[in-house]
Image (tube, rainbow, N blue to C red):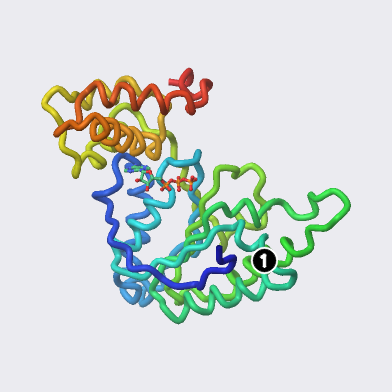
Amino acid sequence: KSQAKRFQPSDSQTTFDDVAGMEHAKTELQEVVEFLKEPSKFQRLGAEIPKGVLLMGPPGTGKTLVARAVAGEAGVPFFSINGSEFIQMFVGVGASRVRDMFRTAKENAPCILFIDEIDAVGRVRGAGVGGGHDEREQTLNQILSEMDGFESNAAVIVIAATNRPDVLDPALLRPGRFDRHVAVDRPSREGRLGILKVHVRKVKLAETVNLEEIANGTIGFSGAELKNIVNEAALHAARDGKNEVEMEDFDSARDKIMMGVPREDIMNE
Ligand code: ATP
């Protein structure tokens, strides 16, 4: 498989309607949407718009989804890269790739540049035992200097995501870099219900299916796991040759996925 996929934007069709719950994150990001829609409105008043937003939360809680939705809401291109891709590159390539990435983003402004799993490249510097981390550090330094370099009139907003904010180099979090922090948690009961509703939109449900009950019985599940339940239930029903997905299909899908949900999370609620 290709190691360095080309850095191309995608037109995001995702909107906030596709993102259930996450009200806090959506509110925080609404300002970014407004800015990307009409940068000049803010720039002419000399308003400072954040360059970088860090989304922090467990896997599968919708960080990528909500970043994509910001681009979709604003109608701007969405560039995305995974932090681990920098690490897999040939020696000396990481930093120049970062340069290219920011150049391309600036050429396409206004736009969103999304860096998933930024911890892969953004771990605290000098933490490696006996060195060997030069490549990663150069890449990180390049990200820092790119963020310092672009003026606030470049309408590029960098959104990064991590589930390990604790390991990030503090330099990444300084003013003018990723200084906006948005925590994304596993969904509440209401959130779970909303997420289930989003994902059953295209599914043929039997009348017996009670989404409230499913939301009640899925404490600790992430959005990704809830999406998975809906799909597993549909597969289960199809395998049995049914015309509609029934409650029992959801029950067995939940039991199957439940095995993968960490117990401590279930006990947190
Ligand atoms: P990771 O840290 O593993 O990259 P993530 O937080 O970026 O995870 P996403 O990739 O955005 O999570 O979520 C995976 C999928 O789960 C989404 O594409 C979406 O279908 C579903 N999902 C997650 N959260 C929500 C939500 N709040 N509303 C609707 N769907 C959701």
Q: Name the residue that disc number 1 marks.
A: 89
Badge 1, how many Cα within 10 Å: few under 14, some, many 20+? Answer: some
Q: Which residue is drawn at 55% across and 58% down?
A: 82
Please indicate whether residue 107 sits to the left or right of residue 71 in the image: right
- State which image quarter holds ligand 1: top left
Q: Is residue 48 visible?
A: no
Judge by depth and name the residue closer to the eye, 45 or 210: 210
Q: Which residue is drawn at 73% across and 67% down?
A: 138
Residue 92's x, y, as percent?
Answer: 73, 72
Please indicate whether residue 93 sits to the left or right of residue 261 in the image: right
66 in relation to 205, above or below: below
Residue 222's x, y, as percent?
Answer: 41, 35
Give the quadrant of the C terminus: top left
Residue 72's x, y, as percent?
Answer: 30, 62
73 in relation to 185, above or below: below
Judge by depth and name the residue closer to the eye, 140 or 30: 140
Q: Residue at x 35, y 66 (%)?
A: 35
Q: Which residue lies furthest to the left in this view?
A: 207
Give the quadrant of the N terminus: bottom right
Please indicate whether residue 87 sits to the left or right of residue 126 in the image: left
